[in-house]
Image (cartoon, grey):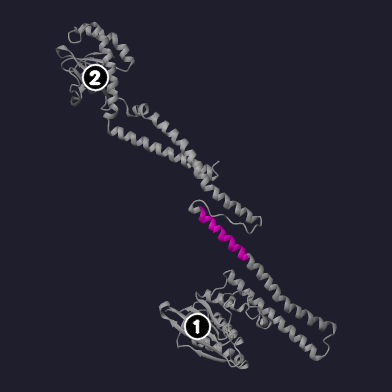
Amino acid sequence: MFRSLNSRLLVSYVVVIMVCLVVVGLGLLVFVRASSPLWTREAYAQLEAAARETVQAVRQAGPLETIPPERLRTALTKVSEEAGERGVRILLLDTQGTIRFDSEGNWEGERLKMDETARSPVLPGQLQGTFLAPGGRRTNRWIYSGRALHRGQTILFASPRPRLLGWFAENLLRPLVRAGAAALVLSILLALLVSRSVTAPLRRVTSAAEAIARGETDARAPASGPREVRALAHSFNTMVDRVEAARQSQRDFVANVSHELKTPLTSIQGFSQALLDGTASTPETTAHAARVIHEEAERMRRMVDELLMLARFDAGQMVMARDPVELGPLLQGCVDKLSPQAQTTQVVLELDVPERLCVAGDTDRLAQVFANLLDNAIAHTPPGGKVSVTAHGVDEEHTVEVTVTDTGKGIPAEDIPRIFERFYQVDKARRRSRGAGLGLAITKEIVEAHGGTITAQSVVGLGTRIAVRLPAWRE
């Protein structure tokens, strides 16, 4: 029953109303108790009405002011039964306050302790107040309405002082119950309205989720309803967009891998078939076939290694060391390693790194980053061009920036945002000779794993500048 949001909202409203009524009732109870005249005044009024009727019945025996004591006792005895049925006790006191007549018969001879502060006349010859029952505890008080008689006698009409809870139940409980019933009906109606306003947008989000589960990838949740529900719908739509982007990326990844593997596999299959069927029969053709098979197999191995590295990055399994790495020797080693390639293509390599410029990182992985950037720069720089490597500290950010700048043909502006994507290559014509387009993607993953950033700037016809920022080593 309470599994749905509607039922929970309904029950919560009912509980809130009931708690409010209980609190209001307790508050009224405390207020009435602190203001006892509010609830004793009514009790006095009821006692006064009963006393008036009893006095009228007694007066049939004669005037109260002059009636003889014996006749008065006889008259009081006659009316005591009817008064007792109304909860009224008749007492006759002498001048000393001693009870000479008690309609119940068990207080006669006792002396009452009157509340002197309340014995002031209400009307001429009329009194009101309270007294403590003979032999009773202080909580056992009675209220009375009295008449002063001749020769100092007093007739009292008394009833037990009403209990607060009883008075509350008699006078306030019914209005509270009625108010609670009305509030309950209103709360149910309000709960239905509120629950609909809340659950309707949630149901639309649920419908969108079910549509996605059925394969309707273009389904989206409408952002409507309360702010929290709109935020939920927005987050859901964002999640769906990201999932769809991830699925598309996965599909592109599989397609690219399949395409990249297809070309070397075709070459390997073709030249191995030539070796098997004897087509490559001369030493020269045999050596050529073997060389192609070896090169394509090596190309496949490099691509598999790169894919495995990217997979480890995606799985969070690549752990980078955080050791002090001096950039001067590291970059010099990369330049020395690629100098033969630069000399072959007639490209000038320049290095400008201050002494003792250190970053925090993994030496081998950083060497892989800068070697890959230099290799790309040299490959895309025409003969007679120049590739420059510079480094400097950015003190206000506690980082070190290393830039690799070439004088090549540059990268079109529309391609710059995508050069770090996997399998993306700007120069489609050199796709076969330059690999699978994973080098810059791996470079970006390594730099970001170090807590750094990599950016590219390029002008077509002038060259490209790649900037890598890494955290500086802080002792």
Q: Which residue is mark 1?
A: 402
Predominant SS of the magenta segment: helix
Q: Circle 1 — which element?
A: strand
245 relative to 126 in the view: left or right: right
Neighbourhood count class around disc 1 (C-alpha, 10 Å): few under 14, some 14–19, many 20 upward: many
Label annotation for residue 145:
2
**Amino acid of disc 2:** Ser
**Amino acid of disc 1:** Val
86 relative to 316 in the view: left or right: left
Query: Residue at 48% of width from left, 41% of height from top?
Result: 190
* Residue 258 picture location, percent across and down: 70, 73
Query: Residue at 35% of width from left, 29% of height from top?
Result: 168
Give the quarter of the figure containing the C terminus: bottom left
Q: Circle 2 — which element?
A: strand
Neighbourhood count class around disc 2 (C-alpha, 10 Å): few under 14, some 14–19, many 20 upward: many
Find residue 180 and report its image quarter.
top left
Above or below, 339 against 197 in this view is below
Q: Nearer the viewer, residue 308 or 385?
A: 385
Q: Earlier in the sequence, mark 2 or mark 1?
A: 2
* Residue 394 picture location, percent across and down: 43, 80
Q: Nearer the viewer, residue 432 or 297?
A: 432
Label annotation for residue 338:
none
Find residue 79 and report its image quarter.
top left
Where are the magenta residues, as a range? 229-246
Query: Residue at 32% of width from left, 35% of height from top?
Result: 30
